[in-house]
Amino acid sequence: MAGEVIVDALPYIDQGYDEAGVREAALAMIEEETRRYRPTKNYLEHLPPLNTTLFETDMMKGEWERMQQRQPVDVLSMKRYELPPPPSGKMTDIAAWTECVENSQAQLEHQATRICNLELMLEYGCEAWKSYLELLMASVAQAQKTLQALRKDIQEINWERKKAQMDGGEKLRELEATWVGLVSKNYDIEQACVTVEEEIARLQREKENALKRRRVEEERANAKRRKIEQQQQEILDRQHQEQMRQERVELERLQREQDAQQEEEQQEVEENEEQPEKEEQQEKDHEEEGATVEQNINQAESSDSQESTESQENSNESAGDGGASTENSNDREEEN
């Protein structure tokens, strides 16, 4: 329900209310809640509406309208309690005198009524007051009886509450002890689980580290094996390259020998073809040398007598040159 309030306090079995600081803490919580509480416009909408027409009368409505219009309160008229004569300007007015006479008659009748009431009170007032006192005492006795019944009901309710709380307190303490034991056991289980998880994590880390080390060792072994294979392959490649180089060198040597042999054969062929030409050239050289010798001899004979000695020397030199040329020609023929 919207208006129902559930109070979970158990004052007969709860403890700790008299400890220092508990009251201050409760008051601080109340102050904090009142400070945070912001009532809305319709915060009483869960309550039934008020019956405001019960006290509305014509006089109250008139007074309410007067207050809304901010008008002053009417002054109480004391005219009914006075016997004034007519005003000086209306001393001859019959209506004014009639009004004054009617007012005097009304006040006279009012005084007669008061005298009658006083006589009745003197005659019956004592008995009426006694009856009122008896009725008042009966009302007081009834109120006292009702009060005692309410107090008895309250006491019985309190006894029932106390008995229910005491009976429930034992069960609550048992449940609290069970709860504390279960919480402690759960805490121990959680601690054991944490320890087991840590142990599992440690073993997992060790396993992972062992796997990592094994992988590293395998990688190192594979790298070493690949390196050895690479070195062996490099050695084989170098041997193959060296063999290829030697074969290439041998082929080049054979090619050079073949080329040299072909060149020698070609040279022999060319020399055989050029042999007649060389012989013709040698013959021409011999003829030219013979012509030169004859010309020198002729020149020597036609020289002056004074130069006979020089001519003679020149002819000897020419003869020597001719012999040398002849020797050279003979040498070339022998070479050919």
Image (tube, grey):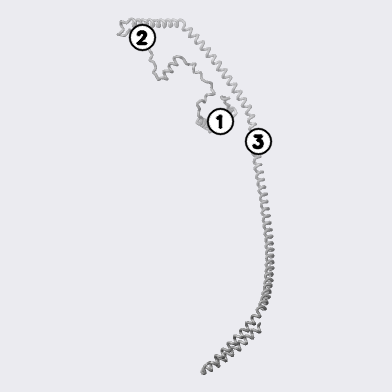
Is tag 3's residue or tag 2's residue first in the polypeptide sequence?
2
**Element carrying mark 1:** loop
Q: What amino acid is labelled 1 in the image?
A: Tyr
Q: Position of residue 23 (x, y in %)?
A: 53, 31
**Element carrying mark 3:** helix
The residue beneath circle 2 is 82
Q: Is residue 289 above or below residue 183?
A: below
**Element carrying mark 2:** loop
The residue drawn where x is 66% and y is 49% is 208
268 or 199: nearer the eye?
A: 268
The residue beneath circle 1 is 17
Is tag 1's residue or tag 2's residue first in the polypeptide sequence?
1
Around disc 2, counting alpha carbons within 10 Å, would you say few (fewer than 14), some (14 to 19), or many (20 or more)?
few
Relative placement, left or right, of 182 versus 67 is right
Q: Which mark is residue 334?
A: none
Q: Position of residue 48 (x, y in %)?
A: 53, 21
Q: Is residue 271 above or below residue 236?
A: below
Count the marks: how many?
3
The residue drawn where x is 36% and y is 9% is 82
Around disc 1, counting alpha carbons within 10 Å, would you say few (fewer than 14), some (14 to 19), or many (20 or more)?
few
Relative placement, left or right, of 261 versus 126 is right
Q: CA distance from mark 3 to mark 2?
A: 94 Å
In the rendered image, which quarter is residue 95 located in? top left
The residue beneath circle 3 is 182
Q: What amino acid is labelled 3 in the image?
A: Leu
Q: CA distance from mark 1 to mark 2?
A: 71 Å
Q: What amino acid is labelled 2 in the image?
A: Glu
Q: Nearer the viewer, mark 1 or mark 2?
A: 2
Q: Position of residue 76 (x, y in %)?
A: 38, 14
The residue drawn where x is 67% and y is 53% is 215
Q: Position of residue 101 (x, y in %)?
A: 36, 5
Q: Are marks 1 and 2 in contact (CB under 8 Å)?
A: no
